[in-house]
Image: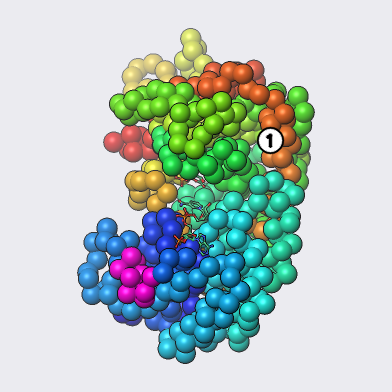
Amino acid sequence: MKQENTPSTLIMIFGATGDLAKRKLFPSLYQLYLKGKMSNNFALLGVGRREWSHDRFKDHVRDSLQASSHSKEHIESFIEHCAYQSHDVSDSDSYIQLKNLANELDQQFELCGNRIFYLAMAPEFFGTITDHLKQDGLTDTKGFCRLVIEKPFGHDLASASALNEQIRKSFSEEQIYRIDHYLGKEMVQNIEVIRFANAIFEPQWNSRFISNIQITSSETLGVEERGRYYETSGALRDMVQNHMLQMVALLAMEPPIRLSTDEIRSEKVRVFRAMRPIEGTEVDDYFVRGQYAEGTVNGTDVDSYRNGENVDPTSNTETFVAGKVMIDNFRWAGVPFFIRTGKRMTVKSTKIVVQFKDIPMNLYYNKEHSLDPNLLVIHIQPDEGVTLHLNAKKTSQGIDTKPVKLSYSASSIDGINTPEAYEKLLYDCILGDATNFTHWDEVKHSWSFVDKISTHWESTTEESFPNYASGSMGPAKSDELLAQEGFEWWPIGELDVKKTIE
Ligand SMILES: NC(=O)C1=CN([C@@H]2O[C@H](COP(=O)(O)OP(=O)(O)OC[C@H]3O[C@@H](n4cnc5c(N)ncnc54)[C@H](OP(=O)(O)O)[C@@H]3O)[C@@H](O)[C@H]2O)C=CC1
Ligand SMILES: O=C1O[C@H](COP(=O)(O)O)[C@@H](O)[C@H](O)[C@H]1O
């Protein structure tokens, strides 16, 4: 197949027999291949504990691509680039075998010693693997070496720092690509473009014109079979520390002086530094936690979190978080950024609603009721697009107004955790562009913010748990959080861009 002139590379996936590799990584790499975005000089080396042959692994990759509508011939030509090594990550000897196979593939596919090590494994293995990659010479090549690390990057600031120190013994910060798959989503990447490429928004993007910003990422699924992990994580660590705060940073950052990785990252770090730290009992004024009870989601009766697999029947783990994040800088003083995320909610949706302040006076329209505020809605998923809510004249003799919407719908991708984000991020990594990966400074500051909240929550049992029905939009306290500031959550189901366009 004709491929772009992208760098040749060996992509070594640790955890290649696992769920993430099968559902996201192989399909994404295949899509890149199909779209001609990979050099023909590439090899995919799967590493797992199971004693599989190359052929068994190739069958596994083939299975993962079956959903693809593309021809068998293309799949087979992709599969020719795949190989497998059975390997126990904690066994020193097996790194030598891995190195030998990597060198063979390097020669066979003319990879120029370029290597991407993708750690799609449980985080407790990250440090051991990076130590061995260096000690056993796998990083000792004449090409580039990059390390892609899956989340969670630590459990708190202390563990994240320890992990960072350990991997920095083998890889420099420039070689490390910490994945936050939200940064690969089309409309998350669009936040900067909407802000910085439109003269109508940037002058208004501050506390003089914006009253509040709401970011909702709701899921209909429960914790499913991930109870063991989730019990140690909860929604705060699972979603807020990374995806939600990253979206806040992109919405709040200053325009970077140029669109380089370093400049964008440093502006995001300045937002993290400006986030008002909240601790102790103060947390209760800013953050609300929830845990789902039984209920009905999309017409199906579902059980409570506490009745889930590998979950403590008296669990204090939150499956929902709503919070008010204040950014204490000149641009954002006094503007709340409300964030909300949870499992087993009414809809699967991620949306950002920027609510503008009311006009100074309602001149003469609709005297009997107030005008709707202008909203800019950024639809992240499942629909992708932008809607601007305005007021316009009602078609009639009078001067009554009606709300109207200007909408742009990008190609909408239905489904959960679609591979497109991984596809973009893998492509960036092959090209050596780390802009959409998180720098250690961002991770450090976000943990520092989140740790104070988790410390308070872990020291106090939430007696009201479970406090929201599955299929609802979270506990009543989440609505109260906004009501006390004179706001309410915009109903995200009704803001659907497709509904606007129909
Ligand atoms: N799955 C998902 O949707 C997401 C996952 N992640 C993260 O990605 C990472 C992987 O997740 P996931 O794929 O779901 O995990 P799985 O449990 O499905 O897979 C784990 C992988 O690790 C391998 N493994 C385990 N122990 C060893 C060992 N001692 N030596 C060598 N290989 C070993 C397993 O090999 P074998 O099967 O042969 O034993 C398997 O390939 C985690 O950090 C997770 O948090 C992040 C976002 C989403
Ligand atoms: O990182 C994670 O994200 C998913 C939600 O991702 P999305 O792309 O479907 O919005 C979440 O389900 C999972 O718990 C979390 O680990």
Decide whether the magenta segment is chiefly helix, strand or loop.
helix
Magenta residues, as a range?
A: 52-61
| Along the viewing direction, whichever of 175 and 209 lies nearer the viewer | 175
Secondary structure beneath label 1: helix
Image location of residue 331, percent across then percent down: 72, 40
Residue at horizontal 43 percent and vertical 42 percent from the top:
225
Please determine whether, in this image, residue 299 is positioned above or below residue 186: above
Whether residue 60 is in magenta: the answer is yes
Left or right of 289 on screen, residue 406: left
Quadrant in the picture for the C terminus: top left
How many discs mark residues in the rendered view?
Answer: 1
Residue 234: percent from the left, percent from the top? 58, 37
Report which residue position mark 1 lands on.
454
Residue visible at 55% across and 55% down in the picture: 122
**Disc 1 residue type (three-letter):** Ser
Name the residue: 63% across, 81% down. Answer: 137
Q: Quadrant of residue 332?
A: top right
The quarter in which the N terminus is drawn is: bottom left
Q: Viewed as shown, does residue 497 lie left or right of 173?
A: left
Q: Is residue 207 above or below residue 301?
A: below
Magenta region includes residue 54: yes
Residue 14 showing in the rendered view: yes
Residue, x 31% and y 27% (percent of image)? 300
